[in-house]
């Protein structure tokens, strides 16, 4: 087993374990900070998939932006949440959560089945790429290519997403404004 | 496998939690599962970079979603003094 494989398994274990902890813990603060660890480990997985630019973006946007936003929302609405925390029973699996667990496990079984069936290494186009030795190698410089593609081949999605982001920002600012005396 | 597990944890969280912020984290987990798949298969697309670029788009979309959702959560909290979606029972005033 090569070093990259060992790293992949370690990262994957960290991601799944910390996500499970995020889902199961009662304490919202701990949940948020374990989500932080999940995101970092995911960035590590992206590096292992040879997508370092995406990994950096993940760290900057998710860890720097989204997590801070979530923390803000938690702190601005925190008093009631903390009160609820103390009242909750410490049972891990209660009856009201049973449907959710059953649904999630069933979905997981279906997905594992599908992954087993498609047999990703023998998929047609992947075989073709590997045959042509055209997959991304670890020492390839991909950022130039990403930038050029972003401005030529994917220009329309890029503009669409920028408009959407502008709309979302305006909408968020409108929603969060102080109510005027009308 | 990791992606599937992550998606299912997110699904479980969305259904079972009584806290809008935790539901939001669940949604983020599911989005991350999708991004992980995009990136993993983007490895085999050297010329067009489809996987990686759409992963970037997905991250930006997630950021926009979160901003709007948090604004809504704050507004709801101001009005109802709770962020439990099960206890919010009317839409306007």
Image (tube, rainbow, N blue to C red):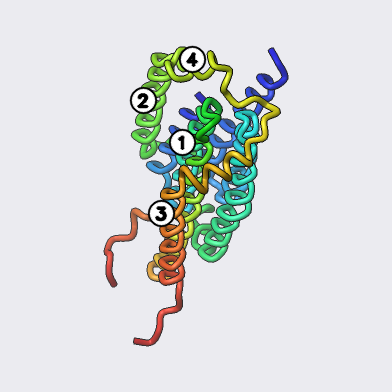
| Place of residue B33 in the rendered image (x, y in percent of width and height, measured from the top left) | 49, 35
Residue drawn at (43%, 46%), measured in percent from left and top?
Answer: B17
Q: Residues within 10 Å of mark 3 (few under 14, many from 20)?
A: few
Question: Are labels 4 and 2 assigned to the same chain?
Answer: yes
Residue toward you, B56 or A28: B56
> Which mark, residue B34?
1
Q: Chain of mark 3?
A: A
What is the chain identity of the residue bearing mark 2? Answer: A
Between the residue at mark 4 and the residue at mark 2, the CA separation in whole angstroms equals: 31 Å
Quarter where residue B15 is shown: top left
Q: Which residue is mark 3?
A: A160
The residue at which mark 4 appears reads as: A127
* Label 4: few (<14), some (14–19) or many (≥20) C-alpha neighbours in 10 Å: some
Q: Residue at x 27, y 69 (%)?
A: B92
- Disc with the residue nearer the chain's start (3 vs 4): 4
Q: From this viewpoint, is residue A177 visible? A: yes
Of all chains, the one bearing label 1 is B
Distance between mark 2 and mark 1 Cα atoms: 18 Å
Image location (x, y in percent) of residue A174: 42, 72
Mark 4 lies on a secondary structure that is helix
Which of the two discs, 3 and 2, sits closer to the camera?
3
User: In this orientation, which residue lies closer to the viewer: B78 or B1?
Assistant: B1
């Amino acid at each position: 087993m090569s070093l990259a494989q060992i790293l992949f398994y370690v990262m994957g274990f960290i991601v799944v374990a910390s996500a499970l902890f995020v889902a199961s813990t009662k304490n919202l603060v701990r949940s948020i900070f374990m989500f932080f660890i999940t995101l970092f480990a995911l960035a590590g997985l992206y590096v292992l998939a040879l997508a370092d630019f995406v990994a950096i973006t993940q760290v900057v946007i998710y860890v720097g932006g989204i997590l801070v936003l979530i923390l803000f929302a938690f702190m601005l609405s925190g008093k009631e949440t903390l009160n609820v925390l103390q009242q909750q029973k410490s049972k891990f699996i209660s009856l009201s959560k049973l449907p959710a667990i059953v649904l999630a496990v069933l979905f997981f079984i279906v997905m594992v089945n599908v992954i087993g069936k498609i047999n990703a290494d023998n998929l047609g186009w992947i075989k073709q790429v590997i045959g042509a030795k055209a997959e991304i190698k670890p020492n390839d410089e991909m950022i130039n290519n990403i930038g050029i593609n972003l401005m030529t081949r994917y220009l329309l999605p890029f503009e669409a997403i920028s408009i959407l982001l502008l709309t979302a920002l305006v909408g968020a600012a409108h929603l969060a404004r102080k109510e005027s005396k009308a | 496998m990791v992606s599937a597990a992550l998606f299912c944890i997110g699904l479980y969280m969305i259904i079972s939690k009584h806290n809008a912020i935790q539901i939001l984290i669940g949604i983020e987990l599911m989005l991350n599962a999708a991004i992980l798949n995009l990136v993993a298969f983007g490895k085999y697309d050297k010329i067009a970079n489809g996987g990686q670029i759409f992963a970037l788009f997905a991250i930006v979309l997630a950021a926009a979603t979160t901003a709007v959702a948090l604004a809504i959560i704050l507004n709801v909290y101001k009005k109802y003094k709770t962020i439990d979606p099960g206890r919010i029972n009317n839409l306007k005033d």
